[in-house]
Amino acid sequence: MALDQAQPSRSWPRGALWRRLRWIVVPIVVVPLTAVLFTGFGRDPSVIPSPLIGKPMPSFSLTALDGHTVSSAELAGKPLIVNFWASWCAPCVQEHPVLLDTARRYGERVAIVGILYNDTAEGAAGFLARYGDGGWPDLLDPSGGTAVSFGVTGPPETFFVDASGVVRGKQFGPVTADVVTAQLAALGVKATP
Amino acid sequence: MIRRTAFTVGATALAALVVAVLVIWLRPSAPMSPAQQAAQLDAQLRCPDCQGLSVAESRTSAAAAIRSEVASRLAGGQSPDEVRAYFVSRYGEWILLEPSSVAWWLLPFAVIGLGAVALIAWLWVGRRRPAPPSAPVSPPAAGVAERVREEVEALDA
């Protein structure tokens, strides 16, 4: 006690000010920092929100593997799944059974179209022969211009488009049955039980 | 006197910096050829399947697709700003390697400025406010000082 009092009295009131302000300063700094780190770690940095959500689907007119020309206008009128894929893409192999199952479960109430990303007709035909052909059109996009118009960064990416042609959802990476069910339910279609 | 000189030098340096930035920003530039415009745009657009590269630097197919889209849009008569806006409308602001708004460039300076203001305010408050009067020191009770000295000497011994 006597030794404490022997210290020179401090003319610098930083200690007093800090003691008074720390209950304000600490939350102002710590709370936002914690919130940023907390949300930042839960988020996948490779997932970029698509600016196309809520906008009309980009139009296209491309040649299918069977030689027919398919345009986006022909696909309007019912909910549409636009799936960008490639035969060299491993997650596309993983999601392919989900798409086959989707075609089976939803039948004529939903249209599906595949758009090939940086792939050849031969490569795509080999993939379909090996993993199963769902019967929906697969379109070649040799310049990659359609993929660019959809803002595709790499396959697989899947867009869910409503009957009026407005993009309502986007899946980065392989779709799962749950994702398809939820996205199509949001478009007002239910699977056949 | 020294402080005033330092202030003058600092203010002059700051003014020179502002003028230099304005001159560089506003200087008239020669009209660019479509190839130059395309090269400049390619350097500003992010390659979607790379890590931190522009489409000009990358050889991936996605980068090639974006480069050909840039070239065909410029050839179709679109301005570089329109082409940039097209890619932002499809990929989002993410596709631009540099932020498009000037506000983002000013943000670090704004943060540093706010910090400086806060620091100055803190120091100013510290200087203005007198130290709280320390509690009156009561003389140690009789004999305490002697006892302390004896104990310290006992420890030293």
Image (spheres, rainbow, N blue to C red):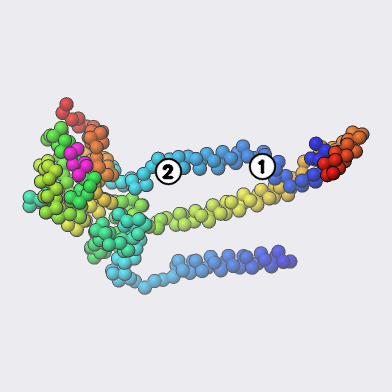
Q: Residue at x 72, y 66 (%)?
A: B2
Residue bearing the label numbered 2: A40
Amino acid bearing label 1: Trp
Q: Earlier in the sequence, mark 1 or mark 2?
A: 1
Residue B68 locus on image (x, y percent): 24, 62
Same-chain check, marks 1 and 2: yes
Write down the residue under mark 1.
A18
Q: Residue at x 63, y 39 (%)?
A: A22
Foreground pick, A23 / B25: A23
Three-letter amino acid code at the position of disc 2: Gly
Parent chain of label 2: A
Residue at left offset 18%, top offset 41%: A96
Dot 1 alpha-carbon crowd within 10 angstroms: few under 14, some 14 to 19, many 20 or more: few
Q: Is residue A96 magenta?
A: yes
Q: Is residue B29 visible?
A: yes
Decide: is B28 above or below A171: below
Residue A132 among magenta residues: no
Residue drawn at point x = 66 percent, y = 42 percent? A18
The residue positioned farthest toward the top in the image shown: A193
Q: Work out which quarter of the rendered image holds the C terminus of chain A and state it.
A: top left
Quadrant showing the N terminus of chain A: top right
Kindly indicate the quadrant of the structure image that contains residue B36.
bottom left
Q: Position of residue B119 (x, y in %)?
A: 63, 51
| Residue B48 falls in image quadrant | bottom left
Q: Main secondary structure of the magenta part?
A: helix
Tell me where the magenta segment starts and ends, as one range: A93-98
